[in-house]
Image: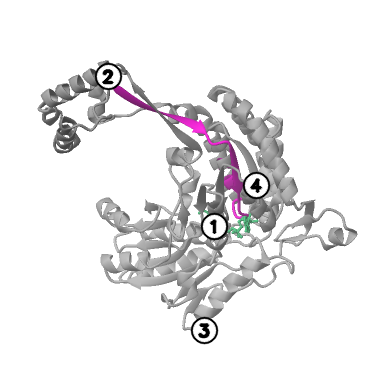
């Protein structure tokens, strides 16, 4: 384990703590408290107490805090990337590219645009507007948002959700992964220095028990990112309290390479898509299907590029995996595939000469795989690129969709019409044509999966709408005129209702005008009853 509960603290009877280690060297990085249910309740209490005043601030005032936080991140970006790299095992350059850059962009986007994205909306209510009615939706904050986050993008995942939640007028309680608590404390520090009032962003470090306590503390929404198994547990616990959840879960994302693809670009993309972050991205390329006529050429290019990758604890292309547990899962998948006939074309296990206490796995390319193997069905979450061939478009789509997951998918072809056509057949929350993995980094686009990859969305307007309660206000400007559907249900009323069913409910103004004499008769009837 990269992080563990300190036995020494437990033995001393002291508050339990979590020890954070560098997974590429085994060096201890620091200790933080293992938050208890009481700690969580207090944090939720403080967040609740702070929420009214935070929501009462204008978008501009809230944006000022977010933009000050952004300025601090910009000033300290090397420190942030270095810390993310040390605590998660990824190269600092990759932490900069995949975590710091996208969050800086996201912070400016939501700080500047949240007001417009959440502007009250007038609704088109069809023929009811001719009855003097109007409807408007106002987007109100939910209250306290609980964020439970994983270790693989310990900075980008929570920061994005914190910024969206705060801009929408909520306060936040964050429970980060037990493997990356120091990154979370840095996030808290940045927002505190940016002037976020007490209680607006609470961070409770801890493990799964702390996460479970956060759900029990009944925030107004849970934004959960993590494995499908834990996501299901969170959803069950939240359902008991009727707390809405967004679940960003695992993936087994396919990449389809057609015979007309730019193989030079596609092979580089496959490499980055499968091996960036040591393959520990929810949207990593986990299955690659190549048209049989170009498979040899594509594979040759991939293997040449794998040989050029540098793997080391610092300043390399590929770092360590985040935990021994994850390393063992990857080894298990490779071992099982090889035992059932897969061929290892590159890598295959722990690199020779790697630091003894580091959790490294070589970038690995497999051929001869099929859909009975775990490496093609379960989330591997490691630097493994299994290659399979297909004969035609229909087979490619069938193979890509043959998965219980559906987070992202990728299609490679020079024919963009074909790319869009195939994209529309893919069962995934996001399909990229001639791209892989990266759209979580685009603040404007929605992120989320179908099937076992999750529920709801984060990022973009759809993600922001997850963090507000739509508040519908309906106004009747003709209150003096009684509604024709009110009591009493006279024979005349029953006849009118039949006409409403036939004509008004057709949505046609012309049809509705035809029943105006009947309508006026009914109104006279109601008026007479009132006057009597
Ligand atoms: P995990 O499910 O083990 O843990 C995620 C978080 O949940 C951690 O903070 C953990 O402490 C907490 N937790 C554990 N048990 C809990 C419980 N019973 N109640 C509440 N919280 C609990 O996931 P992980 O191993 O940290 O992350 C890797 C997984 O995350 C992968 O499956 C990956 O695909 C997924 N992921 C998905 C996305 C996405 O956007 N879809 C993004 C990143 C990671």
Marks 1/4 in contact by CB < 8 Å: the verdict is no
| Pointers 2 and 4 in contact (C-beta within 8 Å) | no
Which residue carries the number 2 mark?
530
Whether label 4 touches label 3, CB < 8 Å: no
The quadrant where residue 197 appears: top right
Location of residue 100 in the rendering, given as x and y in whole percent from the top left corner: 59, 42
Which structural element holds mark 1?
helix
Q: Give the residue number, with chain letter if any, for mark 3.
A: 339
| First in sequence: mark 4 vs mark 3 | 4
Q: Earlier in the sequence, mark 1 or mark 2?
A: 1
Say which label, 1 or 4, has the lower sequence index: 4
Tag 3 near tag 1, CB within 8 Å? no
Question: In this picture, which residue range is highlighted in magenta?
Answer: 132-160
> Which residue position holds label 4?
217
For image coordinates 70% across by 70% down, the residue present is: 353
Q: Is residue 379 magenta?
A: no
User: Is the CB atom of the residue marked by disc 4 within 8 angstroms of ligand 1's nearest atom?
Assistant: no
Q: Nearer the viewer, residue 250 or 348?
A: 250
Residue at label 1?
Answer: 236
């Amino acid at each position: 384990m990269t992080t563990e509960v300190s036995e020494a603290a437990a033995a001393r009877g002291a508050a339990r703590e979590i020890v954070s280690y560098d997974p590429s060297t085994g060096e201890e990085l620091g200790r933080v408290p293992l938050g208890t249910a009481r700690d969580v309740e207090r944090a939720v209490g403080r967040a609740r107490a702070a929420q009214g005043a935070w929501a009462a601030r204008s978008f501009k005032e809230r944006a000022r805090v977010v933009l000050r936080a952004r300025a601090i991140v910009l000033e300290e970006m090397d420190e942030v990337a270095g810390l993310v790299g040390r605590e998660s095992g990824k190269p600092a350059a990759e932490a900069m590219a995949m975590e710091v850059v996208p969050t800086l962009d996201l912070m400016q986007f939501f700080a500047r645009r949240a007001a417009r994205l959440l502007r009250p909306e007038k609704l088109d209510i069809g023929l009811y507007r001719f009855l003097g009615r109007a409807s408007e939706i106002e987007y109100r904050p939910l209250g306290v948002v609980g964020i439970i986050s994983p270790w693989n993008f310990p900075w980008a995942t929570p920061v994005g959700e914190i910024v969206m939640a705060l801009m929408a007028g909520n306060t936040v309680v964050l429970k980060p992964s037990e493997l990356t608590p120091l990154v979370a404390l840095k996030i808290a520090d940045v927002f505190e220095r940016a002037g976020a009032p007490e209680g607006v962003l609470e961070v409770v470090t801890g493990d799964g028990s702390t996460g479970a306590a956060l759900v029990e503390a009944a925030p107004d929404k849970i934004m959960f990112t993590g494995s499908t198994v834990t996501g299901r547990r969170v959803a069950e616990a939240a359902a008991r309290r009727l707390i809405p959840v967004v679940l960003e879960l695992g993936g087994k994302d396919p990449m389809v390479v057609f015979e007309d693809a730019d193989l030079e670009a596609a092979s580089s993309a496959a490499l980055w898509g499968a091996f960036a972050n040591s393959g520990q991205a929810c949207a990593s390329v986990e299955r690659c299907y190549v048209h049989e006529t170009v498979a040899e050429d594509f594979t040759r290019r991939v293997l040449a590029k794998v040989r050029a990758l540098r793997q080391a604890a610092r300043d390399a292309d590929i770092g360590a995996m985040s935990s021994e547990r994850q390393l063992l899962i990857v080894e298990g998948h490779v071992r099982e595939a090889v035992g059932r006939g897969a061929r290892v074309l590159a890598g295959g296990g722990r690199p020779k000469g790697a630091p003894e206490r580091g959790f490294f796995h070589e970038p690995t390319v497999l051929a001869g795989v099929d859909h009975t193997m775990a490496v093609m069905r379960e989330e591997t979450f490691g630097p493994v690129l299994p290659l399979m061939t297909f004969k035609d478009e229909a087979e490619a789509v069938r193979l890509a969709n043959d998965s219980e997951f559906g987070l992202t998918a990728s299609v490679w072809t020079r024919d963009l019409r074909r790319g869009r056509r195939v994209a529309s057949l893919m069962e995934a929350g996001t399909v990229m044509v001639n791209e892989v993995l990266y759209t979580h980094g685009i603040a404007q686009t929605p992120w989320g999966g179908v099937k076992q990859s999750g529920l709801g969305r984060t990022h973009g307007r759809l993600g922001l709408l997850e963090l507000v309660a739509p508040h519908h206000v309906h106004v009747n400007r003709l209150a003096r005129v009684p509604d024709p559907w009110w009591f009493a249900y006279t024979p005349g009323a029953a006849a009118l209702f039949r006409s409403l069913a036939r004509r008004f409910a057709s949505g046609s103004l012309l049809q509705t005008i035809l029943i105006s004499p009947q309508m006026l008769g009914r109104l006279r009837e109601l008026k007479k009853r009132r006057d009597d």
